[in-house]
Image: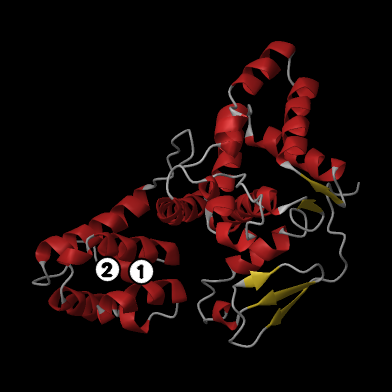
Amino acid sequence: MNPPNPYEWGHYSVIVQPPSFPIGGMENPLLTFASPTIIVGDKSQVDVVTHEIAHSWTGNQVTCKDWSNFWLNEGFTVFLERKASAVLHGPEFSMIEAQLGNASLYNDIVGYGFNNSYSSLNPNLNDGADPDDSSSQVPYEKGYQFLFYLETQVMKTPADFQHMLGHYIDKYRNLSVTYLEFRLTFNQWLRDNYSAADAEAAIAKVNWDLWVLGPGLSPVPLDFSTPNATEFTNIALDYIARKGDSSAANYTDYLQTKNPNLKVIFLDTLALSKDLVTPKLLAKIDADLNVTHEKNPEVGQRWFPMAIQ
């Protein structure tokens, strides 16, 4: 039996680009271009390659018809990437990625403005607008959140949503689409696979205008919190409360964790209270946790600006 949605592009390769390459990865069929910054020795950046491989289906096999529908490439691919992360590292790993993504999404929406079309999944790019101006975490993270909502609060099971996505990719294989084709396919799948009453009840739960056309935050609040993420937030808050005079409780959990994203949550929490972060506090944290010598660039890009300030 052939697997559903098989990889159809031949041999998959990754070519590492010079340091001047300006993005993490680019999903050319057959040959992903990758930044050397993803090779850091602790495997903390390999999920970039997972993302680019997932583009083989959502972005290359089925692609957006125009830049206003860019989330069909990126939101879908983030969704697939996090599904792979959940299999490889456990469901909590995926939820922590979503929590960090939500923080980045919020910052970009604030930057655009809550009523700006560029904070919607279908930005208005008429009248000669430059698509680069709408480039942000919105198509990635708000797109992911919409799919997460469909999977967890509309469909009966995650397996149903997986089957629907496979059907969507098969139906539009080697074609360019807009969100209207996805909406049509989603609704029709429900009608073909659920009872009439269940299908119409599920369809009624989805306000496509608010989710896709509406600017601002996702219209339905979604909870990505996890026990470990809460713990690492509290470690940072404990350090802040101690003002560099002593170590936070449970600080050794930072040293022992194998999830680099928990360290990012710790540092993001510090950054949110940057007015309370002093050289003395940073020196104590570095003495305890050796953050300066972390290999993960996600850690470095948060730690060093705080240290410089």
Residue kind at label 2, given as amino acid type:
Thr
Look at mark 1 in the image and give the residue it sits on.
256
Residue, far left: 245
Q: Is residue 193 left or right of residue 175?
A: left
Whole-percent x, y for residue 124 in the image: 61, 47
Residue for point 77% across, 69% down: 28
Up/down of 260 relative to 203, above or below? below
Residue for point 74% across, 53% down: 58
Whole-percent x, y for residue 5 in the image: 83, 49
Whole-percent x, y for residue 132 in the image: 60, 63
Residue for point 61% across, 79% down: 35
Q: Are marks 2 and 1 in contact (CB under 8 Å)?
A: yes
Is residue 221 visible to the viewer in this orientation of the structure? yes
Q: Nearer the viewer, residue 86 or 275?
A: 275
Picture quadrant where residue 182 is located: top right
Q: Which mark is residue 252?
A: 2
Q: Nearer the viewer, residue 197 or 214?
A: 214
Q: Is residue 172 left or right of residue 253?
A: right
Residue for point 87% across, 52% down: 174
Local secondary structure at mark 2: helix
Residue kind at label 1, given as amino acid type:
Gln
